[in-house]
Amino acid sequence: MTSELTVTRFAPSPTGYLHLGHVRSALEGWRAARSAGGRFLLRLEDIDRPRCRDEYAAAILDDLAWLGLSWDGSVRKQSEHFDDYRDALDRLDAMGVLYPCFCTRREIQAEIARAAGAPHVPYERPYPGTCRGLDMRQRAEKLRSGIDYALRLDLARALALTGPLDWVEEEREEPRRKPADPTSLGDVVLARKDVPTSYHLAVTVDDAIQGVTLVTRGADLATATHVHRVLQALLDLPTPRYRHHPLVTDADGRRLSKRDRALTIRSMRESGISPTEIIARAEFAVDASGSLGS
Ligand SMILES: [Zn+2]
């Protein structure tokens, strides 16, 4: 279909040990790259400094090597590239698609509840846009007061600049174009007062800098792709293809999390389970969930 070199990546956060779900994700990228004679890259998403630990970063590299999932080139650590994200942020700011939000988490929830007319609403609702309407004077005043703020993407303005967008999704054998509709995410946070990036911005910038052509990641991140596509268009970055894979679940059908200590690769290694068996388990767990399709 295309003669370009396939470049994939695995991008865990060093906030805990790898578990079966990570192995599934790493395998997906590793196989796609290896079967196409391409490159498999490793990136550590460690912008959340207080939650990340060097010990976990070292364990991730060690576990991957032990599993035989070798990566190409050096490991990109997001915490070493804040300048890249700041540049991107400045460009977005110059386009007028950012605004500071001074709301606390509690204020956002209260505002959502008011708008919905219900006292209990899930936090997943998008930000209600409270600070989008502040005028220059109000903004300047709040900024001067030194309170914390986040920089949010003004999605309506962004979409007015980009027009309709889509991407190539490879979730089944037949790739298809999927329209980008980021409205359910609303005005996402792209940076904070003291951190010039967020997950969304760093991932989008990194995938472009690392030359990633195929993003493989869990279906839980499929929603994020809609907004990443918008950022790519605004920043004039290439759009990789995407493959969102089913999540590994436990026997009860719940997705694995870092809290499931018994399922870390670390503890499985210690109990004598072989790399081959762990890889088989990562795949079987997905099959068992029934969501892989056939
Ligand atoms: Zn706000």
Image (cartoon, rainbow, N blue to C red):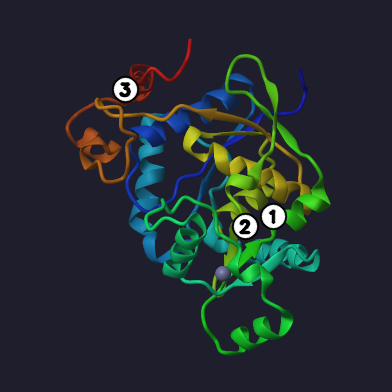
Q: Is residue 196 visible?
A: no
Q: Using the rendered view, name the quadrant where residue 96 is placed.
A: bottom right
Residue, disc 1: 155
Report crowding for label 2: few under 14, some 14 to 19, many 20 or more residues within 10 A (C-alpha).
many
Mark 1 or 2, nearer chain start: 1
Give the x, y percent position of residue 271.
Answer: 17, 32
Amino acid on which disc 3 is placed? Arg
| Residue that protrudes farthest toward the front in the picture | 117
Give the x, y percent position of residue 49.
Answer: 44, 65
Is the distance from the Cβ of mark 1 to the nearest ligand 1 atom less than 8 Å?
A: no
Q: Nearer the viewer, mark 2 or mark 3?
A: 2
| Residue that protrudes farthest toward the top in the picture | 294
Query: Residue at position x 46%, y 28% from top?
Result: 27
Report crowding for label 3: few under 14, some 14 to 19, many 20 or more residues within 10 A (C-alpha).
some
Amino acid on which disc 1 is placed? Leu
Amino acid on which disc 2 is placed? Asp
Residue, disc 3: 281
Query: Residue at position x 44%, y 50% from top?
Result: 13
- Helix, strand, or loop for circle 3? helix
- Helix, strand, or loop for circle 1? helix
Relative to 24, residue 257 above or below: below
Distance, label 3 to label 1, CA atoms, is 41 Å
Is there CB contact under 8 Å for labels 1 and 2?
yes
Q: Split into 4 quadrants, where in the image is the N terminus?
A: top right
Q: Using the rendered view, name the quadrant where residue 180 is placed.
A: top right
Distance, label 1 to label 2, CA atoms, is 5 Å
Residue, disc 2: 187
Query: Residue at position x 32%, y 46% from top?
Result: 17
Give the x, y percent position of residue 220.
Answer: 47, 37
Q: Using the rendered view, name the quadrant where residue 2 is placed.
A: top right
Give the x, y percent position of residue 175.
Answer: 67, 20
